[in-house]
Image: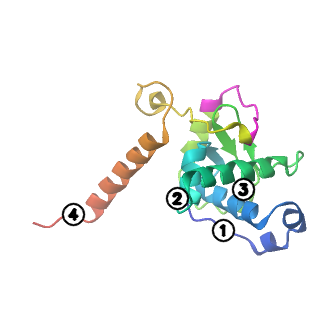
Amino acid sequence: MRIRQIKPSWWLDKELRRRLSAEAREFYIGLWMVADDAGWIEWDIERIAAELYPYDQVARREKAVRNYAGALERLDADQPHLVIHECGHAQVPKMPGHQRNTGRLATTVSDKHRKGCGSHMRPHAATSGPVIGRVGKEERNGSGSGTVDAREAQSDYATEVVAKLAQRYPVKS
């Protein structure tokens, strides 16, 4: 997850207050933290639920993600707050305009999302169930089936973090 900014005007948005519950608004902010700098997310309900609601029961947190995502999708058809594509990716379209990108965070995830969706960028209902992302191994190292499950992505990330920590804080013998 990433650190994001919440502007003071967020608290004054009457339309969001009127049409979304406090929990759905909090979920929306949580999506900003899960999304890359361009607002793209690998739409894996199990992973998103685990990141945003780690202390809730699995079924309850996944149901919450489906419900809140559906509320965000239905909020405004002309200016959507969340678009979930059939290809296994989602976008928070308004997010990049409200966040300051310092250039330190990579946005290559957005490119992978767009490539993964290709010409199949059609929205689907958020309540249709979990979707495993299609950002494939072949985009990273030229092999694989084309899908990555959440456990593999977490494992890759954990390995990368441990390697960086080992470089920064070498063990003294």
How many neighbours does mark 3 have within 10 angstroms: few (below 14), some (14-19), or many (20 or more)? Answer: many
| N-term mark: 3 or 4 | 3
Count of number-bearing discs: 4
Q: Residues within 10 Å of mark 2 (few under 14, many from 20)?
A: few
Quadrant where the N terminus lies?
A: bottom right
Colour setup of the view: rainbow
Magenta stretch secondary structure, dominant: loop
Whichever of labels 1 and 4 marks the residue nearer the N terminus, that label is 1
Residue 21 higher or lower than 109, as above or below: below
Q: Nearer the viewer, mark 2 or mark 4?
A: 4
Identify which residue is drawn at 73% across, 53% down. 68
Indicate the amino acid at tag 3.
Met
- Horizontally, is 103 left or right of 16 in the view? left
Q: Which residues are magenta?
A: 116-126
Kind of residue at disc 2? Arg
Give the side of residue 66 with respect to residue 52, left or right: right
Mark 4 sits on what residue?
170
* The C terminus - image quarter: bottom left
Give yes or no for contact between labels 3 and 4 (Cβ–Cβ under 8 Å).
no
Q: Residue beneath label 2, please?
A: 104
What's under tag 1, amino acid-wise? Gln
Given this view, does label 2 or label 3 mark the residue nearer the observer?
3
Residue to which mark 1 is pinned: 5
Label 3, on which residue? 95
Label 2 vs 3, first from the N-terminus = 3
